[in-house]
Image (tube, rainbow, N blue to C red):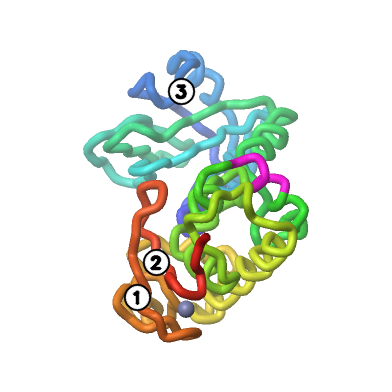
């Protein structure tokens, strides 16, 4: 997401949306696609931000366009198949929104409504000051789903991917299958520390910036070898030497050590 933002920002910021064409009613529903296009047309892009899994296009009028790419959404500077929207800029360039599976969303909000909306949709950033054990404990206490599945909920913690959820649970010695509401306050503290440590280790490994920790699941090469459990089924646990096991939790591939992350 941060990579996408960084690629788009230099060409989008400061430009006027000379013509806006929205081609798929699913993109803006329940709002009418023509009305949304009309709201955007003629406005100037002040800045492009990333918030959790949203791209936020801040406009001169005060409006904000919130884009969620979901599974297959993406932006292109050339004609592509499955075009769902087209932004023609005042420099003559043409930015195309492509979405094969059509789960992506475009939502236009008044400036004052952007922050409350994002706060409700996105939990705190895992390396930010709002992500504390008390917050995490409260969120987990309300849910009976397996701990791993709750950690992947963006409202609990923003942008923690599948890899780092597994790595953090291993570090915290917690089972991905434990019902979230059975996690104790002490375990929540351990988990917050483990999430931060796993992310920081990932950042260090990549020698990259803080914003790049959202590694796609298909991480490759030397990086993958450095994961403690992710992708390591059949390998010995680096802590207790038991064999790392792969299961599915909430539809996602999940790797854990059945001995030191045992539950119950
Ligand atoms: Zn182990």
Query: x, y percentage for residue 69?
Result: 43, 41
Of callouts 2 and 1, the N-terminal one: 1
> In the rendered structure, which segment of residues is drawn in magenta?
138-143
Name the residue carrying label 3: 28
Location of residue 114 (image quadrant): top right
Residue 243 within the magenta-colored segment of the rendering: no
Location of residue 217 (image quadrant): bottom left
Left or right, 240 with respect to 231, comes to right
Predominant SS of the magenta segment? helix
The residue drawn where x is 53% and y is 28% is 107
Location of residue 95 (image quadrant): top left
The answer to whether residue 10 is seen in the rendering is no
Name the residue carrying label 2: 255
Residue at mark 2 to residue at mark 1: CA–CA distance: 7 Å
The residue drawn where x is 39% and y is 66% is 255
Of callouts 3 and 1, the N-terminal one: 3
Name the residue carrying label 1: 232
Callout 3 secondary element: helix
Single out the residue that lies furthest toward the left: 81
- Number of numbered callouts drawn: 3
The answer to whether residue 225 is seen in the rendering is yes
Q: Height in image: 21 above or below 94?
A: above
Query: Is the shortest distance between ligand 1 and the CB of mark 3 under 8 Å?
Result: no
The residue drawn where x is 55% and y is 20% is 39
């Amino acid at each position: 997401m941060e990579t996408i933002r960084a690629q788009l920002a230099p060409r989008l910021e400061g430009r006027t949306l000379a013509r806006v064409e929205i081609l798929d009613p699913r993109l803006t529903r329940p709002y009418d696609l023509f009305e949304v296009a009309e709201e955007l047309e003629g406005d100037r892009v002040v800045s492009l931000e990333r918030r959790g899994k949203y791209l936020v296009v801040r406009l001169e009028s005060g409006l904000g366009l919130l884009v969620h790419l979901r599974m297959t959404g993406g932006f292109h500077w050339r004609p592509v198949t499955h075009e769902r929207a087209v932004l023609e800029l005042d420099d003559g360039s043409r930015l195309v929104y492509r979405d094969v599976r059509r789960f992506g969303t475009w939502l236009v909000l008044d400036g004052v409504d952007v922050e409350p909306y994002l706060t409700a949709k996105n939990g705190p950033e895992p390396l930010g000051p709002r992500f504390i054990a008390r917050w995490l404990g409260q969120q987990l206490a309300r849910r009976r789903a397996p701990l791993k599945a709750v950690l992947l909920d963006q409202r609990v913690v923003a942008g923690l991917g599948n890899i780092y959820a597994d790595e953090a649970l291993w570090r915290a010695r917690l089972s991905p299958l434990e019902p979230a509401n059975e996690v104790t306050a002490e375990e929540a503290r351990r988990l917050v520390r483990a999430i931060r440590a796993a992310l920081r280790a990932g950042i260090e490994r990549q020698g990259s910036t803080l914003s790049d920790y959202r590694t796609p699941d298909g991480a490759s090469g030397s990086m993958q070898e450095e994961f403690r459990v992710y992708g390591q089924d059949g390998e010995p646990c680096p802590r207790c030497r038991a064999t790392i096991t792969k299961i599915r939790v909430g539809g996602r591939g999940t790797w854990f050590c059945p001995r030191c992350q045992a539950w119950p």
